[in-house]
Amino acid sequence: MYEDIFQPNTNITTLNDAVKKVKNEIGKVIIGQEKMIDLLLTGLLADGHILIEGVPGVAKTLAAKLLSRIIKVDFSRIQFTPDLMPGDVLGTSVFNPEKGSFEFKKGPIFSNIILIDEINRAPAKTQSALFEVMEERQVTIDGNTYKMSDPFLVLATQNPIEQEGTYRLPEAQLDRFLFKITVDYPGIEDEVNILKSQQSVNTKSLLESVEPVLNYDELKHFREMGQSVTVDPALMEYVAKIVHATRNNPAVFLGASPRASLAIFRTSKVWAAMKGRDFITPEDIIEMCIPVLRHRLMLMPEKEMEGISVDELVQQIISEIEVPR
């Protein structure tokens, strides 16, 4: 096993402790949904945008709000609607009669953690406004470029059920999301605990009880620490083989790009660090493959008609590739 081959060379105890503190604070409000919380923290430490998909009422928006409370950074929320225009998101130039010139008024995208609620309700014109800012962390308007402040994290939610009044996200935009997290209903035990937690206090009171755990400098330090995790060359090849296989599978119309390889690589290192290790294992890579790939692959129409999901296909691809040991 890799645990026997490598000896830790980086002290990641502080990162591991910080993750536990963050999860404890989130646990004051959100009961259950451990996988969603783990992936949200992984995306935050890997410096990547996250798409969260789930039916209403499973704490998607609440989780995004909690992240902004736990970290001492700015937060803004944008409700996407069919009549939303790019200027409503990015900002616009407004004429100042006193100065006799136009001044740029920043939109709500100029923040640190941005929650885009129901991202698939805005038309393509507004969706395209996110292309540059999500990838290059900047906005270009009227020939002027405005840099985003760090950290810059977009958390977007969408409902998988409703179709009326929604628009399919462009593949180029989907590829800019590090993860797509799917959130299921809680189990019976978790739902009972949710009811118990609300017996004497409401959600607003619980939110106010959440204390900040990290500041920006600490977050930056932990991000650097996560990327210092050791990766064996055999595991790099394993990542490349998985992503390459998505491009040659007869069930796939559109395979994953090298951006997906980098996403699996980065998030696997963070996932390992969050588990208290300074090296990654094949299990870390396998754990990251589905949330990284599920929104990047397009199945052939006949496979969709057969009811095959992308998650199932990714699991099949992984099972066909020899795991390095």
Image (spheres, helix red, strand yellow):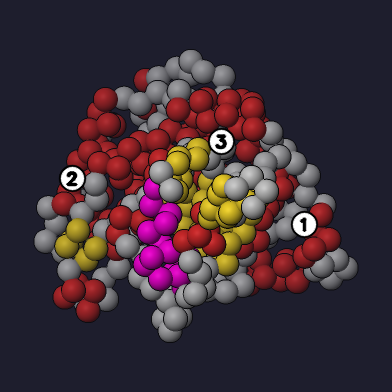
Q: Residue 216, percent across and down?
A: 64, 32
- The stretch in magenta equals 118-134
Height in image: 116 above or below 191? above
Residue type for callout 3:
Asp
Height in image: 45 above or below 299? above
Q: Does the magenta stretch include residue 101?
A: no
**Is residue 304 visible to us here?**
yes
- Decide: marks 1, 2 in contact (CB < 8 A)? no
Return the residue at label 3.
Answer: 150
As helix, strand or loop, the secondary structure at mark 1 comes to helix
Mark 2 / mark 3, whichever is N-terminal? 3
**Residue in the foreground of this view, choosing between 324 and 198:** 198
Of circles 1 and 2, which is in front?
A: 1
Q: Residue 111, percent across and down?
A: 60, 46
Residue at x 25%, y 41% (from the top left corner):
258
Label 1, label 3: how many angstroms apart (C-alpha)?
24 Å
Residue at x 68%, y 59% (from the top left corner):
30
**Residue in the foreground of this view, choosing between 185 and 56:** 56
**Around disc 3, counting alpha carbons within 10 Å, would you say few (fewer than 14), some (14 to 19), or many (20 or more)?**
some
As helix, strand or loop, the secondary structure at mark 2 comes to helix
> What quarter of the picture does the N terminus occupy?
top left
Residue type for callout 2:
His
Residue at x 40%, y 23% (from the top left corner):
230
Of circles 1 and 3, which is in front?
A: 3
As helix, strand or loop, the secondary structure at mark 3 comes to loop
Mark 1 / mark 3, whichever is N-terminal? 3
Residue at x 16%, y 75% (from the top left corner):
302
Mark 1 / mark 2, whichever is N-terminal? 1
Return the residue at label 2.
Answer: 244
> Which circle marks residue 207 in the picture?
1
